[in-house]
Image (cartoon, rainbow, N blue to C red):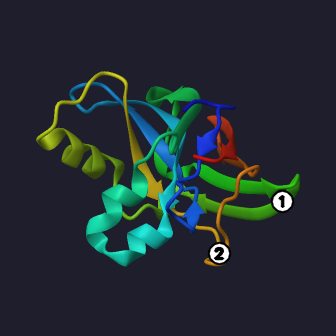
C-alpha cells in the first residue's frame, strides 16, 4: 500500500511488527535507480514456529507499504549512511521509537540485487526491500488503531495506520 493507506493485521497471528527497511528501486537489469522507504510487516509467532514458515509470516493482504518518494541514486553519495527511524503510536502516545543506519545492514546492496536478478525476471520499477535493523521489543505487538511512521533521511516519512484484516 502507499503512504496514508491502512496496513492490515493478520487474523491468525498474535505477534506482529513492522519492519522498517530501505527500498531499492531497480531497473530490469538490476541497476539501482533510487531509494524509498519500506515497511515489510512480519508475524513473529508464525515465523518462529518453523523457518519454513517465513513466506507465510511475511505475505498477506496489505502487509507492506512503500513511499512517500523516491530519492534518485545519483543524488546519494553513500547509501550506507542513511538514518532510519521507526515510531509507533498507540492512542496518540509514542509506544516504540527505534533508530538504525543503513550501515548496519549485513549484506551489501549490490549482493542483494544480484540474488534477485540471478534467476528472476525483474521489471523496471521493482522495489527490493533490504532487511530491517529495527525490531520492537519482544513484548510489543501491533494493534488496530496504531500508527506507524518510518523515516529515512533524505527520502521522507512513510506513515500508515493499522487496521484489522
* Vertical order, 161 against 122 (above or below): below
Count of marks overlaid on the render: 2
Residue 25 in the image: x percent, y percent? Answer: 40, 31
Can see residue 134?
A: no
| Residue positioned 21% across, 28% down in the render | 29
Q: Position of residue 61 (x, y in %)?
A: 47, 41
Number of the label disc, if any, that sits on residue 137: 2
Residue drawn at (44%, 61%) of the image = 105
Q: Quadrant of residue 4?
A: top right
* First in residue order: circle 1 vs circle 2: 1
**Which disc, if any, is residue 94?**
1
**What secondary structure is marked by label 1?**
strand
- What residue is rendered at 52% in x and 35% in y? 36
Q: CA gap, disc 1 to disc 2?
A: 14 Å
Taking depth in this image into account, of 132 and 109 the one nearest to the observer is 132
Image side of residue 60 versus residue 108, left or right = right
* Element type at mark 2: loop
Amino acid at each position: 500500500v502507499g503512504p496514508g493507506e491502512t496496513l492490515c493485521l493478520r487474523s491468525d497471528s498474535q505477534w506482529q511488527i513492522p519492519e522498517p527497511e530501505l527500498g531499492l528501486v531497480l531497473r530490469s537489469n538490476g541497476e539501482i535507480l533510487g531509494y524509498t522507504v519500506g515497511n515489510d510487516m512480519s508475524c513473529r509467532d508464525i515465523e518462529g514456529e518453523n523457518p519454513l514458515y517465513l513466506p507465510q509470516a511475511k505475505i498477506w493482504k496489505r502487509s507492506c507499504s512503500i513511499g512517500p518518494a523516491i530519492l534518485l541514486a545519483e543524488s546519494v553519495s553513500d547509501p550506507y549512511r542513511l538514518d532510519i527511524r521507526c515510531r509507533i503510536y498507540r492512542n496518540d502516545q509514542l509506544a516504540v521509537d527505534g533508530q538504525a543506519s543503513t550501515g548496519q545492514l549485513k549484506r551489501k546492496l549490490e549482493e542483494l540485487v544480484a540474488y534477485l536478478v540471478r534467476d528472476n525476471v525483474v521489471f523496471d520499477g521493482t522495489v527490493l526491500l533490504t532487511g530491517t535493523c529495527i525490531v520492537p521489543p519482544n513484548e510489543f505487538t501491533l494493534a488496530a488503531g496504531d500508527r506507524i511512521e518510518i523515516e529515512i533521511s533524505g527520502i521522507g516519512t512513510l506513515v500508515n495506520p493499522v487496521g484489522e484484516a
